[in-house]
Image: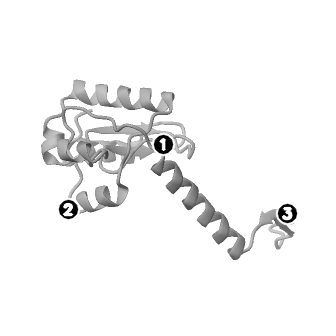
Amino acid sequence: MFNRITPVPAAGISSTLPTTSRRAFGRRLGLSAAGLTLAACSASEPATDSAVDEEAVDEGFVPAQNAASQAAVTPDSALTLLTDGNARFVAGTLARRDYSDQIRATAAGQYPFAVVLGCIDSRVPIETVGDIFAARVAGNIVNTELLGSMEFACRLAGSKL
């Protein structure tokens, strides 16, 4: 599966790194995309809250946040949305989302209800389109740049938590 190569030594250090061909990479990427698509198609009941558009719920999909749904969210209800979402994640219950529709719906503006500081761990999903403004850094530390991003999320994008 992997071919071993010996790169040009840098400063007298040599190592072997696994490599893969473009064709094999493309095949793996396609299989991964197909797997994610199938996983998304097997979603169960949508998560609902008072800020969700009822028409979209009737179709079985959770819509992206918009200005009206964001305005209806308070800091307490934002925390409830996050804890409910975490409970769904732990239980393995999926909320159905049409990501193409959500991307189109948020093209003109974003209306996240919360900002989350998270680790750069690829195994831990934080956000879905339009819901959460995510700031990621190794070690979960807040530096000047991250603080500026979090302030932007609250002051200009309207995050409540």
Location of mark 3 (residue): 16
**Identity of the amino acid at label 1?**
Pro
Location of mark 1 (residue): 125
- Circles 3 and 2: CB atoms closer than 8 Å: no
Q: Is residue 81 left or right of residue 42?
A: left
**Identity of the amino acid at label 2?**
Ala
Q: CA distance from mark 3 to mark 1?
A: 32 Å
Badge 3 crowding class, 10 Å Cα cut-off, few under 14, some 14 to 19, many 20 or more, is: few
Q: Is residue 120 left or right of residue 67?
A: right
Number of numbered callouts drawn:
3
Q: In terms of secondary structure, where does tag 1 sit?
A: loop
**In this rendering, the label closer to the viewer, 3 or 2:** 2
Badge 3 or badge 2: first in the primary sequence: 3
Q: CA distance from mark 3 to mark 2?
A: 47 Å
Q: CA distance from mark 2 to mark 1?
A: 24 Å
**x then y, percent, for residue 152:** 25, 47
In the foreground, 15 or 45: 45
State the image quarter where residue 44 is shown.
top left
Q: In terms of secondary structure, where does tag 2 sit?
A: loop
